[in-house]
Amino acid sequence: MPENTVRTRRCPDCDGFPTVVITTGRTTANGARHTITVTCRACHGTGALPLRRLAASLGR
């Protein structure tokens, strides 16, 4: 079977997971865990790169 050669615009830095929630280890007053949300700096939380940045990252 041939391999899939279709290129995706997925961000190579976050691999398509642009926003994540990280626990800090502390708890709030009601006992819930304190979390922070972090977005990818390369794609700014979209999960995909613009075509011109994708071409530049591939060396074209």
Image (tube, helix red, strand yellow):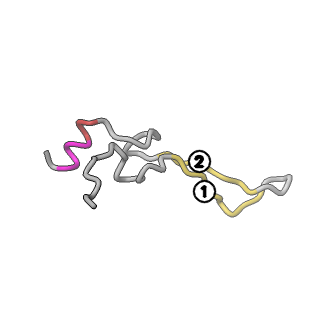
Residue at the spot 37% in from the left edge and 46% down from the top edge: 10
Contact? badges 2 and 1 (CB < 8 Å): yes
Could you classify mark 2 by the number of other residues whose Cα lies within 10 Å: few (under 14), some (14-19), or many (20 or more)?
few
- Report which residue position mark 1 lands on: 22
Q: Which mark is residue 37?
A: 2
x, y (%) of residue 12? Answer: 34, 52
The local secondary structure at tag 1 comes to: strand
Q: Is residue 2 above or below residue 17?
A: below
| Among the 4 quarters of the image, the one containing residue 48 | top left
Residue at the spot 84% in from the left edge and 53% down from the top edge: 29
Total tally of numbered discs in the picture: 2
Give me the C-alpha separation between circle 2 and circle 1: 6 Å
Q: Please report the bounds of the magenta region as a residue range.
A: 54-58
x, y (%) of residue 9? Answer: 33, 43
The local secondary structure at tag 2 comes to: strand
x, y (%) of residue 57? Answer: 23, 48
Q: Residue furthest bottom?
A: 25
Q: Is residue 55 magenta?
A: yes
Figure quadrant of the C terminus: top left
| Among the 4 quarters of the image, the one containing residue 49 | top left
Amino acid carrying label 1: it is: Ile
Could you classify mark 1 by the number of other residues whose Cα lies within 10 Å: few (under 14), some (14-19), or many (20 or more)?
few
Left or right of residue 47: residue 59? left
Left or right of residue 39: residue 6? left
Q: Which mark is residue 2?
A: none
Give the camera-side residue of 37 and 19.
19
| Among the 4 quarters of the image, the one containing residue 41 | top left
Q: Is residue 27 above or below residue 47?
A: below
Amino acid carrying label 2: it is: Thr
Which of the two labelled residues, at mark 2 and mark 1, occupies the earlier sequence position?
Answer: 1
Residue at the spot 27% in from the left edge and 58% down from the top edge: 3
Left or right of residue 4: residue 30? right
